[in-house]
Amino acid sequence: MTDKIVIIGGGIGGLAAALSLLKRGLDVEIHEQAPELKEVGAGIQISSNGTRVLYALGLENALKRVQVLPSGRVIRHWSTGETWNWFELGAVTRERYGTPHVMLHRGDLHGLLADAVRAAKPDAIKLNRRCAAIENSGDHAEVRFEDGATVRAAYVIGADGIHSKVRAGLFGADKPEFTGAVAWRGLVPMDELPPHIRQMQGVNWLGPHGHVLHYPVRRGEIMNFISFVERDDWQIESWVTQGTRDELANDFRGWHADVHEIIRRIETPYKWAMMVRGPMPHWSKGRITLLGDACHPTLPFLGQGGVMAIEDGYIVAACMAKYFDDPSTAFARYEEIRRDRTASVVRKAHENRRSAFSPGLAKPGAVAAEVAREWQQERVRERMEWLYAYDATAVAI
């Protein structure tokens, strides 16, 4: 019998779980398939419910070195550029929830988590380890890698993302359903943009058949761009497929010049098809469980995909620490705490996808009416309170 916990996948969720376990005195190894540990070039927003966990893990000062604390978020009209204040962030959010809403480069967040894991256990992260199979064996679990190596563990956590090998090994292949929407992402150096676009705030462009969001990351040195468009001719679910600026610009033909100012300066735009999956009734079998996108992948219309993985990592670590000798109780409690919350996030993100780019938004005055009805600060705050006020660090385990 071994006391080691093996995590498959060295992304944000896997690293958060590893750090949470190490902080509780448990032995952890992370096995990552890539030859180097890095994240894709993209932005990520971590709302207060996520920064609450990161602060509990001792990362407040590390975050301060790379984050943007935005003043707020605004809505802009897809063709006229008319602007409405939507959501105050900054000091208002910190006062309301205790920790701030921050905007980050995914690579920066990933790097500071990896640094913290290595500070706690220098050899915790193993690279070039591509999972081939997993197996439960009574008092332990076993992972076999494509190079033929095997590792034995007290527990295995599959944190290997939307195309999870661990999930497929436990529950079989999944059947994703195409949403009819394609997403684009890209980064632009902030100093290449006109001053009026170079703002320390999030901007959501509301329009028909599409939606654009941009916000600053890496201390305000880079603008992160993400957009969604209704299309049915691209159904590859990969974050690393390159598109072209011309194709991206064509998807937003007729949109305001400021949108195209950013698109023109994106060096390499990437595109991916947006898929949905039904909720899983269980995430665990024996001594093996899942977290994050491996068990509840979510569309990016609520800004919570990464945050849910961070919350999962903290909670699963707490459950393992309390019930280490009782896997069925540890995982039953983990799922009991997390299943309804993550299912609500997945459902509400999918609902937001439908309202984010209604065809009716092309009509004169329709965006203003939509802002008045659905995007008022008070209404949004009421709808989001359950999300942002949640404290994963205070949940009874």
Image: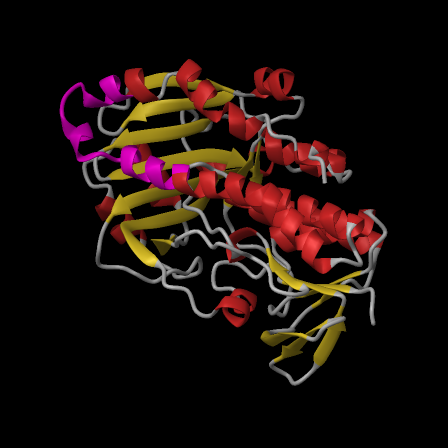
- Compared with 358, 75 (above or below) is above
Q: Residue furthest left?
A: 363
Q: Which residues are magenta?
A: 348-370
When asked about the image quadrant of residue 301, the answer is top left
Q: Residue at x 61, y 64 (%)?
A: 285
Q: In the rendered image, which quarter contains the C terminus?
A: top right
Answer yes or no: is residue 121 visible. Answer: yes
Q: Residue furthest right?
A: 25
Residue 222 at x, y percent in the picture: 52, 39
**Is residue 214 a member of the stretch shown in magenta?**
no
- Compared with 343, 133 (above or below) is below
**Is residue 359 a member of the stretch shown in magenta?**
yes
Residue 368 at x, y percent in the picture: 25, 18
Q: Nearer the viewer, residue 284 or 37?
A: 284
In this rendering, the count of numbered labels is 0
Residue 199 at x, y percent in the picture: 47, 25
Q: Residue at x 72, y 48 (%)?
A: 319
Q: Is residue 18 left or right of residue 40?
A: right
- Compared with 289, 342 (above or below) is above
- Compared with 107, 137 (above or below) is below
Q: Is residue 18 left or right of residue 227?
A: right
Residue 336 at x, y percent in the picture: 60, 45
Q: Is residue 301 left or right of residue 178?
A: right
